[in-house]
């Protein structure tokens, strides 16, 4: 990249576990680099506040003059532009954009609900679709397979993709309903979900240790998946199909994991929530006021949004790690697919191309990941993408500094209340008959104000 652009970049790396602390110390010291990657999303009060504080640069005019490639991409669709610009219509963060060889495209779905397909086949069962189907399948897993934890979930009984919750038209967080923002735990559908989970918990269909288990909302504990402790669980694409075996886990013969769509109440329904994926990634680069040559920084950034820059970042050096075929398609060479030094395709890709999505600014082409994607994983991505996303709150909407401070103060307590109540009802400590009292308590502790802050941010986002 240095040879191509004649720009020397000195990278300052920070360990993930130390990033928050070092970021705060860096801002306080006034000694910050010309550009910051990712750090802008953590700026207290948001990007606009960083500009008013004299630390971040408003790049609006610089984008006009020095970043024609970047601008041409995000202006393809007004929805992309909304995610790139601030509420005031400013360019402050330079966002990573996802693409294929034909143009911009959404990130593939990477997380969702999965099931032991080999168990379904052994029992002669079809893929469960409705909540009723799921009750039957989980019961069969428990009684006929001897599965100790038929369904695994996160510490509050839900999973990242909100499967099961979404069947009732809610999530366990804020979500979009038409033009309104709602809070799932305060809605009637949440009570219906609680009743279902409490019933499954009582019957031993939900992991009895879900509150303290190692499993998270994003993915269940791989050890318990591999040893047959569970039959349905959240996971990520690398473990679909025979992915557990391919990544080194010992599993029984025939072990196979399939992605499944989120359950619905009635066949033909389509839920409207899944793990959010998008074209405009949240990862972005900002330029600081310490930068002595802002036009040069912008020109360097803009190169990352050219086709040449994309091919170089995502596929490597032509003739070395990839080739262009006669029909205009691209292929990785054996340097990647059958590395002579014994590197796996994943490691070889990391060595000879830029690292994965979210690591650097520019266009990120998901073709880079296909070298290690199996047919089962492709099918899984397609399955998870069939669920709708109309309920997903846009990641790129933002509160003002004042809104954010008031919201964070109130919502921390609300979230704690909701989590505690959820666990109490599922485990039988409390009855779902107290739901209306619980909702009233949420409003007494500031839910109306929090809904107002979320709605204001959403309205501004829609009007960008």
Image (spheres, grey):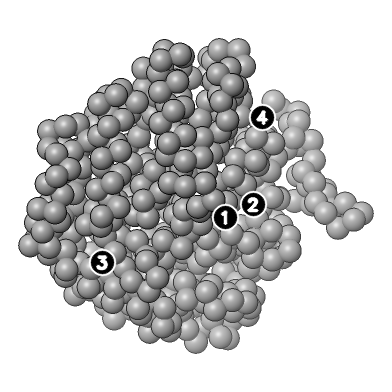
Assess whether mark 4 and mark 3 are in contact (beta carbons under 8 angstroms). Answer: no
Residue sitting at x 41%, y 61%: 391
Q: Earlier in the sequence, mark 1 or mark 2?
A: 1
Residue sitting at x 80%, y 51%: 330
Viewer-side residue, 360 vs 35 = 360
The 10 Å Cα crowd at callout 2, few under 14, some 14 to 19, many 20 or more, is some
Assess whether mark 3 and mark 2 are in contact (beta carbons under 8 angstroms). Answer: no
Residue indicated by mark 3 = 44
Q: Earlier in the sequence, mark 1 or mark 3?
A: 3
3D distance between C-alphas at marks 3 and 4: 42 Å
Question: From the viewer's perspective, is the residue at label 2 or at label 3 nearer?
Answer: 2
3D distance between C-alphas at marks 4 and 1: 26 Å
Question: From the viewer's perspective, is the residue at label 2 or at label 4 nearer?
Answer: 2
Q: Earlier in the sequence, mark 2 or mark 3?
A: 3
3D distance between C-alphas at marks 2 and 4: 20 Å
Residue indicated by mark 4 = 343
Q: Earlier in the sequence, mark 2 or mark 4?
A: 4
Question: From the viewer's perspective, is the residue at label 4 or at label 1 nearer?
Answer: 1
Secondary structure under badge 1? Answer: loop
Residue 285 in view here: yes
Residue indicated by mark 1 = 107
3D distance between C-alphas at marks 1 and 2: 8 Å
């Amino acid at each position: 990249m240095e040879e191509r652009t004649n720009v020397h970049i000195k990278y300052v790396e920070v360990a993930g576990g130390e990033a928050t602390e070092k970021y705060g110390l860096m801002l306080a010291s006034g000694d910050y680099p010309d550009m910051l990657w990712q750090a802008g999303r953590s700026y207290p009060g948001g990007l606009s506040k960083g500009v008013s504080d004299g630390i971040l640069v408003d790049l609006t005019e610089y984008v006009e003059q020095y970043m024609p490639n970047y601008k041409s991409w995000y202006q393809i669709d007004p929805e992309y532009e909304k995610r790139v610009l601030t509420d005031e219509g400013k360019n402050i963060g330079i966002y990573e954009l996802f693409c294929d060889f034909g143009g911009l495209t959404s990130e593939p779905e990477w997380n969702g609900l999965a099931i032991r397909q080999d168990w379904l086949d052994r029992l002669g069962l079809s893929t469960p679709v409705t909540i009723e189907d799921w009750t039957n399948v989980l019961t069969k897993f428990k009684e006929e397979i001897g599965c100790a934890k038929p369904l695994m979930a996160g510490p509050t009984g839900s999973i990242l993709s909100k499967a099961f919750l979404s069947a009732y038209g809610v999530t366990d967080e804020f979500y979009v309903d038409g033009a309104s923002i709602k809070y799932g735990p305060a809605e009637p559908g949440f009570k219906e979900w609680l009743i279902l989970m409490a019933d499954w918990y009582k019957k031993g269909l939900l992991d009895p240790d879900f509150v303290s288990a190692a499993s998270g909302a994003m993915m269940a504990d791989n050890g318990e998946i591999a040893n047959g402790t569970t039959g349905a669980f959240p996971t990520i694409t690398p473990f679909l199909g025979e992915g557990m075996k391919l990544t080194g886990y010992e599993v029984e013969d025939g072990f196979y994991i399939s992605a499944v769509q989120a359950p619905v109440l009635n066949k033909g329904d389509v839920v409207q929530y899944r793990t959010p994926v998008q074209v405009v990634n949240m990862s972005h680069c900002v330029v600081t006021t310490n930068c002595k040559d802002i036009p040069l920084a912008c020109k360097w950034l803009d190169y990352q949004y050219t086709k040449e820059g994309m091919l170089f970042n995502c596929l490597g050096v032509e003739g070395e790690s990839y080739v262009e075929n006669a029909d205009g398609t691209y292929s990785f060479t054996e340097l990647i697919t059958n590395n002579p030094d014994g590197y796996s395709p994943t490691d070889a890709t990391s060595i000879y191309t830029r690292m994965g999505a979210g690591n650097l600014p520019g266009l990120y082409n998901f073709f880079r990941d296909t070298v290690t994607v199996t047919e089962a994983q492709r099918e899984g991505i397609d399955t998870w993408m069939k669920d709708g996303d109309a309920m997903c709150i846009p990641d790129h909407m933002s509160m003002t500094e004042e809104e954010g401070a008031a919201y964070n103060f109130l919502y921390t307590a609300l979230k704690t209340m909701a989590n505690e109540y959820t666990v109490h009802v599922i485990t039988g400590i409390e009855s779902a008959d107290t739901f209306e009292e619980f909702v009233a308590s949420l409003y007494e502790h500031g839910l109306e104000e929090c809904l107002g802050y979320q709605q204001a941010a959403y309205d501004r986002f829609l009007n960008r």
